[in-house]
Image (cartoon, rainbow, N blue to C red):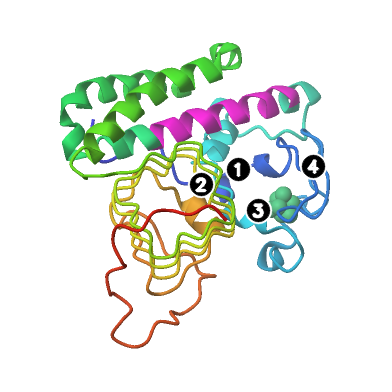
Amino acid sequence: MSDERSPVDLRADCGNCFGLCCVALPFAASADFALDKAAGEPCVNLREDFRCGIHARLRERGFPGCTVYDCFGAGQQVSQVVFGGRDWRGSRETARRMFQVFPVVRQLHELLWYLTRALTLLAAAPLHDEIRLALARTEHLVHGDLDPLLELDVPAYRAEVNELLVRASELARAGVPGRRDHRGADLIGARLRGADLRGANLRGSHLIGADLRRADLRLADLTGADLRGADLSGTDLTGALFLTQTQLNAARGDSATRVPAFLARPAHWGASDLPVGRASARPRQGRRPRRR
Ligand code: SF4
């Protein structure tokens, strides 16, 4: 097994999926989705060929949430592997089981992604054998039969893997002096412009709409942090731990934002408004985060 990649494809391949995220998941009308939709009910915009009828206009039509969602490859895994290419329109029973297992496989694929990232952390080398075991166990579940997947206690399994990821994160951030602990913190709309958040624990923090412009988030643990609408213009995310493409896509940023090499700069981000020659300037150090 490679240290860099899992054999399971963790990149979404919508062309080989039966639009599972557009059917299996429930939506609540909000700034992310223009309407309510129950789990198992096809979105009104889903076409007969399982493609989105408003794909090119999702944001302007009130569905920005669809532009940031990532199934980590669970869609094609369930459609093509678990169900062997049978779609949900042919049988109610197939549909029921397919929609039931999709969120389970999605969570397992997400764990595979986190574990794969953890294997790239050199400072977490003492845990790499444990991480490889957890990867193998999770892959075994993904490749296994349908019934064990449906019976899996997903929250308990996630908690077990998460404990390992937390230890890996602590090892990776241990060398950053004065690192802050904002785990699970309510930082909605917080003014953190230029803040020194190097090596900070921001796991599960709520950073919706936060001003993180020019903040230093190198080596910060961003597992599950809610970055919707957060402003990352000029922010340094180099080496940020467990930052996903979904989180990045949900935030705002610009050409001066330093994005980890394993992620892509979102297409909707704007150009930098920093003066020429200052786009890569270091932010002020030692500033304490302030609430709102
Ligand atoms: S709007 Fe398009 S992408 Fe979003 S759920 Fe509906 S069909 Fe899927």
- Please tell me which residue is depicted at 28% across the width and 25% down the height of the picture: 131
Which badge, 4 or 1, is on the more N-terminal residue? 1
Q: Are marks 2 and 3 in contact (CB under 8 Å)?
A: no
Circle 2 SS class? loop
Mark 4 residue element: loop
Q: Disc 2 or 1, which lies upstream in sequence?
A: 2
| Magenta region | 96-113
- Circle 1 packing at 10 Å, graded few (<14), some (14-19), many (20+), is many
- The image's mark for residue 66 is 3
Q: CA distance from mark 1 to mark 3?
A: 15 Å
- Give the percent coordinates (x, y) of residue 51: 69, 54
Label 3: how many Cα within 10 Å (few below 14, some 14–19, many 20+):
some
Nearer mark to the viewer, of 2 and 1: 2
What kind of residue is marked 1? Cys
Dividing the picture into quadrants, the one containing residue 284 is bottom left
Asked if residue 46 lies left or right of residue 227, the reply is right
Q: Amino acid at mark 2?
A: Ala
Q: Which residue is mark 1?
A: 17
Amino acid at the residue labelled 3: Cys
Residue occupying the point 77% across, 33% down:
39
Q: Mark 4 and ligand 1: say if the CB distance to the nearest ligand atom is below 8 Å.
A: yes
Magenta stretch: dominant SS? helix
Q: Is residue 164 visible?
A: yes
Residue 191 is covered by the magenta coloring: no
Q: Residue at label 4? A: 42
Q: Measured along the vertical axis of the image, is residue 175 above or below residue 136?
A: below
Q: Quadrant of residue 93?
A: top right
Element on which disc 1 rests: loop
**Is residue 208 or residue 60 the one in the foreground?**
208
CA separation in Å, label 2 and label 3: 13 Å
Please say if the residues under marks 2 and 1 sit with CB atoms less than 8 Å apart: yes
